[in-house]
Amino acid sequence: MKSANQFEAKNYTLKVLLSAAYNLSAPEILGGPDWVDSDRYDILGKTPGDARPTPDQQMAMLRKLIADRFDLAFHGERRETSIYSLTVAKNGPKLTESKAPPDTPAERRPLLRIRYFAARRRMPGRDASMAELATVLQRSIDHPVVDQTGLSGRYDFDLEFLPDDTQFNGALRDVIKPEAARHTSQEFVTFLQEVVGHGKPPQEIHIFVDNLSAHKTSKVEDFLHPSPGSPPLHAHLFVLVESSGDLVLTD
């Protein structure tokens, strides 16, 4: 939500929107025309009333919007598939129970989501359940995630991981991601030059960076905005502070 009663989603494919709206992993959505997984859309909508809707209410609204705007037709099928099972280790859970009041309304809880950094992914969880953790995890990997922990509480945790080919539908397979404990602005410019050298117009290049001071120097600015008359390069700072049965689309 962009505000208490304004829903915004930018540059998402219909498949990603369906994954969120119906709480499915992307491989569970089958069929449909090719553009379902290629064309991208922006959504800006206003929710009724003044109160901020809960996450479940937001997804119900998203389902209705998708059905209305895309004339969506689908049916469910039962299929055998591999899953990831979220379970408790044999030594028991070592999670920190949330200190948030147990009666905190759902719409006031921090949204659980993956944050994107140059060479890693982080998921800061605050007042989150294991069911919510499973839902967010399955949006980025190649199989559904099922919560089988038996834990009904809400917890605070910080999850950090490196992406591989099983995550994000293989989209990060060719990501250039040199790792270093620290780097200078000149090393960052060298990295940008390598990235641009891999691009082929009109291919878009997305650069994931954090707010490190080495990324905000005159050398970086000079590279992104060269001499007058030269076309500027545009870098975007991506920090996302921020899905069983199968859903089969019908052409």
Image: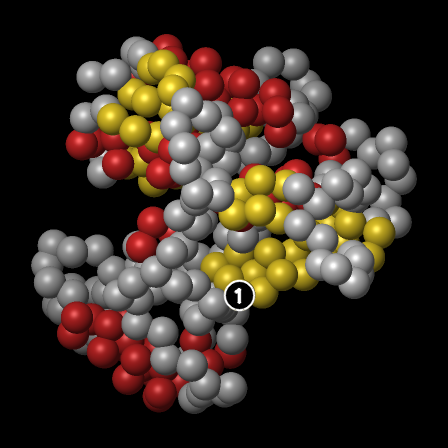
Q: Is residue 128 visible?
A: yes
Vertical placement of residue 6 versus 135, above or below: above
In the rendered image, residue 192, in percent from the top left (x then y), is placed at: 28, 76
Asked where in the image residue 200 lies, by quadrant, the reply is bottom left
Vertical placement of residue 123 versus 245, above or below: below
- Please, what is the three-letter code of the amino acid marked with disc 1? Phe
Q: Which quadrant: the N terminus?
A: top right
In the rendered image, residue 58, in percent from the top left (x then y), is placed at: 57, 24
Count of numbered circles in the view: 1
Q: Assign a secondary structure to mark 1.
A: strand
Which residue shows up at 30% across the image and 29% down it?
Answer: 30
Which residue shows up at 44% across the image and 71% down it?
Answer: 119
Tell me if mark 1 has few (under 14), some (14-19) or many (20+) residues whose alpha carbon lies within 10 angstroms of its own: few
In the rendered image, residue 70, in percent from the top left (x then y), is placed at: 30, 17
In the rendered image, residue 240, in percent from the top left (x then y), is placed at: 51, 52
Which residue shows up at 78% across the image and 49% down it?
Answer: 155
| 194 displayed left or right of 139 | left
Query: Which residue does the numbered mark 1 point to in the structure image?
Result: 161
Residue 136 vs residue 48, the one in the foreground: 136
